[in-house]
Image: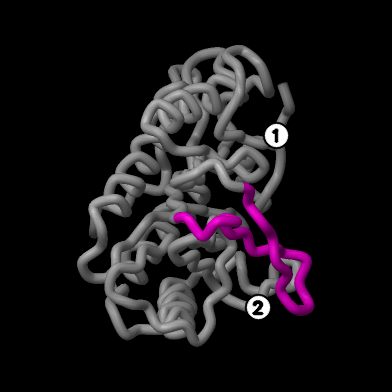
Amino acid sequence: MIPIPEIDLPKMRRSCHTAAKILQYVGSHVRPGISTNELDRICEEYTVSLGATSACLGYHGYPKSVCISVNDCVCHGLPDDYVLQEGDIANIDVTCIVEGYYGDTSGMFTVGEVSSEALRLIDVAEKAMYKGIEAIGPGATTGDIGFAINKFVTKNGYTAVRDIGGHGIGRFFHGDPFVPSYGKKGKGTRLVPGTCITVEPMVNETDADVVESGIENSSIKIYHTADKCLSAQFEHTILITEEGCEILTVFEGE
């Protein structure tokens, strides 16, 4: 069990609500013909309008306000001049800071009409996240989460990325514990009530390797599937409670 400093829950709730609101807003602008740079601009302007700060901008040299991972990009996709095309799928990963607390969430968005194969992958990735969340109960460990995710993903013929996963969050962006998308029941770090983690499985169509590339003047890496197969990811920030957990990054409108 790794102790994590107790959080100010009202502040954490506000940050997570804001992150969810930003994700929904940016996602509503996804369409054929818009560039990922334009989505980044929309994200930054909306984040500022809400009185929040992008946690991504400047983080270890990352030069943008949001991560947008298109098609075969597993995570940390860097917005650029790429124009979204009919049939693309894109993960938008938003992290904001409100009153010193971090809210982190991501979701998949389709660009126009997409293939049935892409829709199925997206569906499995989202359900895999919820399978991991459902595994959080009294005395649960990170291994319980990973086991539930991996079992569901492999049952559906896909591969869960092993080397990248969720993390502790609160008054910091990334911290202990690492939350994997594979594992053994009862193994790993025991979850501490009153603290927060992210659950964020990345699901690939095949079992091909994941390859990394660099970002100029940044230590952040971009990850792609080696065989260019599609990848999908969903993410929620989760509060660990005595009874189980609570999803904090749910936005249900005003």
Residue 75 location, x and y as percent? Answer: 56, 58
Q: CA distance from mark 2 to mark 1?
A: 29 Å
Q: Label 1's element?
A: loop
Pointer 2 local density, CA inside 10 Å: few below 14, some 14–19, many at least 20: some
Quarter of the figure with residue 143:
top right
Residue range (magenta): 209-229
156 in relation to 151, above or below: below
**Magenta-highlighted stretch: main secondary structure?**
strand
Q: Confirm whether the magenta stretch covers residue 237.
A: no
Q: Is residue 41 visible?
A: no
Position of residue 208 in the picture relative to residue 71 (left or right):
right
Q: What residue is pinned by disc 2?
A: 63
167 in relation to 17, above or below: above
Name the residue at 52% across, 26% down.
145
Position of residue 16 in the picture relative to residue 101 (left or right):
left
24 in relation to 166, above or below: below
Between 246 and 208, the residue placed more toward the observer is 208
Residue 250 location, x and y as percent? Answer: 34, 48
Residue 87 location, x and y as percent? Answer: 29, 68
Residue type at mark 1 is: Ile
Name the residue at 47% across, 55% down.
229
Q: Which mark is residue 228?
A: none
Question: Earlier along the polypeptide chain: callout 2 or callout 1?
Answer: 1
Pointer 1 local density, CA inside 10 Å: few below 14, some 14–19, many at least 20: some
Residue type at mark 2 is: Pro
Name the residue at 48% across, 78% down.
40
Q: What residue is pinned by disc 1?
A: 4
Quarter of the figure with residue 50:
bottom left
Residue 70 location, x and y as percent? Answer: 45, 66
